[in-house]
Image (spheres, helix red, strand yellow):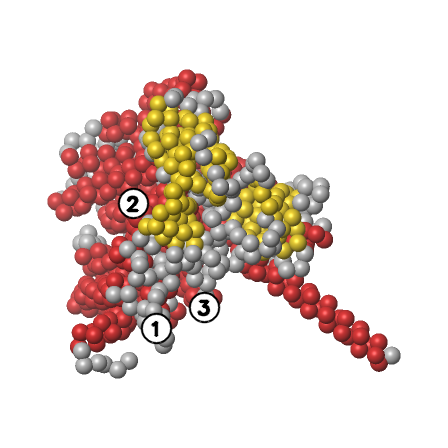
Amino acid sequence: MSPVKKKRLSMVVLLLSAVSIATFLIIQAFNQNMMFFYSTTEVKNGTAPVDRDFRIGGLVVNGTVKRAQDSLLVSFELTDSQTPVTVEYTGILPDLFREGQGIIAKGQLNQNGVFVAKEVLAKHDENYMPPEVQDSIDKAHQHREQLVQNAQTQLEQAKIQ
Amino acid sequence: MMPSENTGLFATLAIPEVGHFALILSLSFAFVLASVPLYGVRQNHQPFMQIAKTAAIGQFGFMGLAFACLIYSFLMDDFSVSYVAANSNTELPIIYKISATWGAHEGSLLLWGWVLAGWTLAAAFLSKPLPENLRATMLSVLGMVAIGFTLFLLITSNPFERMSEIPEQGRSLNPLLQDIGLAIHPPMLYLGYVGMAVSFAFAVAVLLHGEFKMAWAHWAKQFTLVAWAFLTLGIALGSWWAYYELGWGGWWFWDPVENASLLPWIIATALIHSLGVTAKRGIFQSWTILLAILAFGLSLLGAFLVRSGVLTSVHAFASDPSRGVFILIFLVVAVGLSLWLYSIKAAEVHQRKRFVMVSKESLLLLNNVVLVAMMATVLLGTIYPLILDALGIAKLSVGAPYFNTVIVPLTIPLALAMGLGFAANWIEDQPQSLLQRLWLPLVISALIALLIPLLLLPSVEGWAIIGLFMAAWIASTALMWLIRARPQSLPNSMQTFGASLAHIGFAVTITGITMTSIYSIEKDIRMEIGESYSVDDYRFEFLGVKQQEVANYLTSKGEVKVYENGQLINTLYPEKRLYLSQTMPMTEAGIDAGLSRDLFVALGEQLTDTAWSMRVQYKPFIRWIWLGAILMALGAFLAIWQSRMRTSNTSPQSTKRKESLPAGKKLTETA
């Protein structure tokens, strides 16, 4: 091999190895840090993962926010208007956290089916609804309508028979 | 609306229409700019090419008039304009009435348009080093960009739209935006974002022209440097604001909107260096052009992400799908056409020249590659969730840990190559002699990286050593480069000084990031009135909370005395504000700022009559993050100031610096 070719080859090798290291790092980091969103119904159904962080979203149910007396532990219920899930969080809640507001929490499910949040997000606009939450509520409504419709058709079929 | 007998009143009523009309006039100037000079180039007709200047003035003037009209409507509380009604309020202090003009979607786009017109004007009048036809082509391309933006404004986001029912009171500006940092953050950012349009137009013009001379690269580098400096300041301001206003002490969240500003910044950084190599050595032409197209494309992508409503963040105020579609089409057309042009013409522009592995240019290329890799990883993490969501596959988010695990390791080769690059010679260098030149900075950096954590810091952490080493390495090699360059004249020394300063600024930022990320202490606690809490050597004593009514909000003002080793050093007043017009609570932190550390207290909620939740933080060296950004921008401005002096006094060739050329070698290529 001529010196020029040798240099070129080593350049290519260097570049390739850099690219593959980078790609490896990216894929690793990506797989570890992807966080999926689940609605409260999906969490109750057991669709959501255990031992892994994910995001849950819904409306804070009125009258469910409870605070511990001597620490910053807070518990409240979240719902997609169909299924409520209890969430626990230790720390300061965001300014716009309030009952009836749509929020998103990041964290894990524990054995008792309680979602232990590491972070609670409420957006800085009083009229704002996180799209994920809106989506999960819409789905819950659709689901309910579907159920009602099914019941009605069954009823009609029963009548015909 | 009927004109009334009172002409003064009539004038007041018609101001928004004047603004609207000025916007349309500005669009027509943009059409002239986009077509006539280009036609002049085709016909080789001088007067047609020179119309570009007049058109640029007209476009800038009328866009400015439109902007002034909107500010006037805000100052007059003209709530018949729906944009004013949605974002202002009679109670709003005057300064925020003005900044509310660009506080939401429509107005900020108007500002964007005006800034674009301003850059176009600057490009029209400060482009003497470029030949007439290249200049005319470039300005026409800028005119096309202006057409796109102005149409976007007029069709989807008209800020002057009237309402049939005039409300008595406006909705007021989002309290989050009622802040001086946020009043200047968008203009800075836009000056940077939109400045990329000039490099883009330049690149397209060069492609059409089919030739890329070294002196032109020098010209383009100055413009890119100015844009880059503003972008740097804009990003830093945003980060600083997030720290004291929004983030409860966080300074960067890898929020998609933050990423949207970081992406063009990374590529602009690569572009500046690539332009530098093209200007000096006459190589990398096609790479430079590709970067210029990419930087502008990423600016547009940023605009799309922020403006389309696909993102959920404080920045994404407006969600109107038609806007997103418009920007997306604009992005695809602009980037698609220029890449198509690139694929046909790049070979013509490119000059094949040999360059060797160990040389300044190959180290700069290496860093360019690293920067592009950084951009790609940030881009992936930002848009992958959006794409999956759009396709209906899954709803997911990519957290900050992803970005940290990828970007932090990539910074290491970047820093190492940066130091080597300072010391390396152009054209060809010897590895042994390069290392010989660098042993001193190497030893100094290693000592700093080991001794500071051992002697001064609370614990020895691996990443702290690495981070401090990188910072010390960059700073010491940059200093050595400055000393070794020994420039003869003041202008030259200013350029070298500016470049050196900018890199030292980067080292300062790295130091800040390292120290803050590793040694911060953050506690969420419950505090009874009269109680104390200690963090490190600092004791925080909570004295109570007072209610007050100020201007347009109610405040609960906490009082916290801070003692260092038993000595009172400051009294902090963290606040919880309730804005009356929107009944929106806001947290204002109490911060004791210092060069070596910040003490940060934020008031949470009232838990009982005598207890509040509180966040107490110790943030070492956090100011260095933004201080570094200021140094970077300052360095860039110094370098340009010098360059401008040089281009106005002498031709670029005659002052070509001989520094760092090995003896016996000459630059064979001059522009």
Find disc 3 in the rendering and name its residue.
B322
Return the x and y of residue B536 as percentages of the image width and height: 44, 25
Q: Residue at x 48, y 38 (%)?
A: B610
Discs 2 and 3 lie in a common subunit: yes
Dot placed on the residue nearer the N-terminal end, 3 or 1 = 1
Q: Residue at x 26, y 82 (%)?
A: B2
**Label 2 chain ID:** B
Residue nearest the observer in this picture, B45 or B495: B495
Q: Residue at x 32, y 68 (%)?
A: B79
Classify mark 3: helix, strand or loop: helix
Find disc 1 in the rendering and name its residue.
B166
Find disc 2 in the rendering and name its residue.
B229
Return the x and y of residue B587 as percentages of the image width and height: 42, 45
Q: Can you tell which of label 2 and label 3 is closer to the viewer?
A: 3
Residue nearest the observer in this picture, A73 or B591: A73
Q: Residue at x 27, y 34 (%)?
A: B501
Amino acid type at mark 1: Ile
Q: Is residue B180 visible?
A: yes
Classify mark 1: helix, strand or loop: loop
- The numbered dot on residue B296 is none
Return the x and y of residue B217 as percentages of the image width and height: 27, 48
Q: Is residue B428 visible?
A: no
Work out whether B271 lies above or below B316.
Answer: above
Amino acid type at mark 2: Ala
Dot placed on the residue nearer the N-terminal end, 2 or 1 = 1
